Image (tube, grey):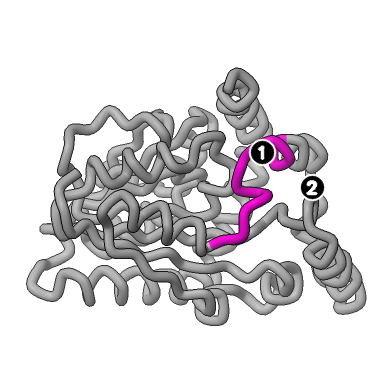
Amino acid sequence: MASLNAIIGENREYWTGRAKSYADVNREELSTDQRIKWQNCLEEKIRAHFPEKRPEEISVLEVGTGPGFFAILLARAGYAVTAIDLTPAMLDEARKNAGEMSGRIRFMEMNAEALSFENGTFDVVLSRNLTWNLPHPEEAYKEWSRVLKKGGLILNFDANWYAYLFDEKAKEGYEKDRENTALQGMRDENIGENFDICENIARRVPLSRIRRPAWDLTCLNRLGLHAEADEEVWKTVWSPEEKVNFSSTPMFLVKAEKIAVR
C-alpha cells in the first residue's frame, strides 16, 4: 500500500514535467477537427441522458482535466463545468488554453481518489486517459459515484495503455504499431520525454495488468450503478494518426448511471 500511495506523488512530479508538451497536444486538438469530433461525442451522450435539461442546468465535473480539453469544450457549449487535476502545472496550462473561457470554468487542485465535494453535487462526472494510472482506481470510482446525483452519468474514456508490459500478445501489437507509425511517416506518440518514468509507474499500478473495460463494469455495477461499455468509440473520436499509433490499444468508453444512492 505504501508503494501505491507513493505513486500519487510520482504522478504529480511526472505530469508537472509533461504539462507544457501535453498542453501543446490539447491546443492542437482544439484547433483541428478533433475538437468537433469530441464535442459531438460528449454532447450526444449528455443530451441523450438529460433530454429535458438545458446545458446551463447540467453540472459537470471533469476529473484529471490536464490542460483542460474536455472542460473547455463543455464550457463553450454552456455547461456548468468544474475541472480538477492533481497537478498545479496542468491547471495553469488549462487556464491558458481556456483563454476567455477560463472564468466560466472552476479549476481546482484535487486528488481523483479523494474528492472534497459533498455527496450528490454533479449531474455528470467524466474523464479521459486517467484511470489507467491511478493507484486505487476502485476508490476513485467510489468517489465519483458519491459526488454524482441520483440519475447522474459517468463517462470514462480510457484504454489498456500499458498492457504490453505484461502481455506478450499486447507487446507484439504495440511493436507493430511502432513499425506502422514509422512506415507512414507519422509522429510516434509513444516516444516522448521521460517515457521510461511513465512505464515505471504503469508497472506498479493495478490496471496495467487487468483487461478492461470488463473490470470497470464489474466495479461500477458493484457500486450500484448501471454500467455499459462502448469498445468502438475510438472509431468516432480518434484522428487518423491516433488510429495508427494506437491500433492495438483501442480507446473504450465506460458509461454508467447512478440508479441507487450510495
Secondary structure character of the magenta stretch overall: helix
The answer to which of marks 2 and 1 sits earlier in the sequence is 1
Give the amino acid type for the residue marked by disc 1 in the picture.
Answer: Arg
Give the amino acid type for the residue marked by disc 2 in the picture.
Answer: Gly
The location of residue 186, given as percent across then percent down, is 81, 71
Quadrant of the drawing holding the C terminus? top left
Instruction: Tell me, yes or no, whether the two marked residues, 2 and 1, touch with CB atoms within 8 Å.
Output: yes
Q: Which residue is mark 1?
A: 18
- Rendering quarter of residue 70: bottom left
Secondary structure type for disc 2: loop
- Rendering quarter of residue 258: bottom left
In the image: residue 108, left or right of residue 135: left
Q: Residue at x 82, y 52 (%)?
A: 191
In the image: residue 57, left or right of residue 246: left
Mark sitting on residue 192 = 2
Residue numbers of the magenta segment: 201-212
Q: Residue at x 29, y 43 (%)?
A: 82
Question: What count of labels does the image hold?
Answer: 2
Q: Residue at x 87, y 67 (%)?
A: 172
Residue 95 to residue 1: above or below: below
- In this orientation, which residue lies closer to the viewer: 7 or 45? 7
Residue 41 to residue 63: above or below: below
Q: Residue at x 54, y 31 (%)?
A: 89
Other residues around mark 1 within 10 Å, as few (<14) / some (14–19) / many (≥20): some
In the image: residue 184, left or right of residue 142: right
